[in-house]
Structures are given as C-alpha cells and as structure tokens.
Image (cartoon, grey):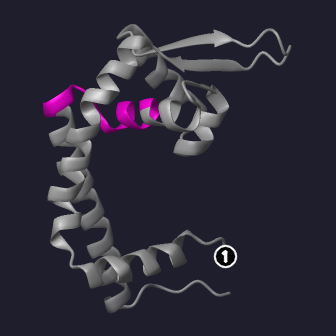
Amino acid sequence: MRATELSKVEHQIWDAWRRTTDSVNARIESDLLAASGLSAPDFEVLFRLSELGKGALHQHEIRRALGWEKSRLSRHLTRMEERGLVLRKGARVSGSGAVEVSITVEGRKVLRAAKPHHGDAIRRHFLEALSRADRAVLVRVLSKLDEDP
C-alpha cells in the first residue's frame, strides 16, 4: 500500500478525535485528582490490581494491560510504592524472578473512595453528552477500531 497524505476531511476527523479524547481525559483526570489525590495512571494501576488481579499481578501483566513501556511502569510503581499504595516483591518461588505487584490496604482504601468520583467524572464529561443512540453508535464504531487489522 502506497503512503498518501490525509485528505482535508480525514485530517478534520483525526484532529477532532485527538482533541476530544485529550480534552475529555484531561477533565476526568482533573476531577479525579481533585477529589481523591489519585492521577488517572494511579487509578488505572490500582483498578487493574483490584479487579483483574484480585489484589496482585505480575509487573509485566500490568504493563501489558496498560500498554506502557517497562521503564514508565517501573518509575510509576516506585512513586506509588513510596505513597504506600502498592508493594512490589520478587517472585522467587517460581524461579522466574518476575516482580509481583500487590495493592496495599491503603491502596484499596484510596481506590474505594476514588471509584465514585471517577464514575461521576466520566458521566459528567463524557456519557451525559451522548444520547442513547449516540452511545450505541459509538460502541459500534469503537469496536471496529479495537479489532485487529
């Protein structure tokens, strides 16, 4: 397939998508941070540990779920560990050397308090702007974009 520039309409679609997702995400994160002290990345890590890992996941599983680089996750987990939200330990039992990350009691407490604020922010800055029909169309469109090519 030959590379070509975007048409004017294609560029408008892409630009609207990028600006809108950036703006909505920034407003949601701002509300979450003000209400709970958690950044969106903090929330995502804690949520995945709590919901997907039932409290613990290997560091590479978190990295895969978030789509982050290894160094970014490592630095972020260090900051979260310093705040007492997560705990890391090597999985020496299996001999793999894999690092297991677990949510602490404090991390669970902070996540539990943050969840309603997170939900409210998503509703206020995203869902309430959409009709029932808009939501159905958006689910259909986003499902297409999420499929492997």
Quadrant of the rendered structure where residue 102 is? Answer: top right
- Principal SS element in the magenta part? helix
How far from the left and from the top, in percent, is residue 12?
29, 83
How far from the left and from the top, in percent, is residue 95?
86, 13
How far from the left and from the top, in percent, is residue 70?
60, 31
Query: Which quarter of the rendering shows the N terminus?
Result: bottom right
Q: Which residue is drawn at 38% across and 86% down?
A: 10
Q: Which residue is drawn at 21% across and 79% down?
A: 131
Dot 1: what SS? loop
Queried whether the magenta region covers residue 38, the answer comes back as yes
59 lies left or right of 48: right
How far from the left and from the top, in percent, is residue 4?
53, 86
Q: Residue at x 62, y 42 (%)?
A: 64
62 lies left or right of 110: right
What segment is highlighted magenta in the picture?
A: 34-46
Residue 130 drawn above or below residue 125:
below
Amino acid type indicated by mark 1? Pro
Queried whether the magenta region covers residue 115, the answer comes back as no
Badge 1 crowding class, 10 Å Cα cut-off, few under 14, some 14 to 19, many 20 or more, is few
Residue with the mark numbered 1:
149
Closer-to-camera residue (46/40): 46
Q: Residue at x 23, y 40 (%)?
A: 116
Residue 91 drawn above or below residue 142:
above
Query: Which quarter of the rendering shows the C terminus?
Result: bottom right
Quadrant of the rendered structure where residue 139 is? Answer: bottom left
Q: How many labels does the image show?
A: 1
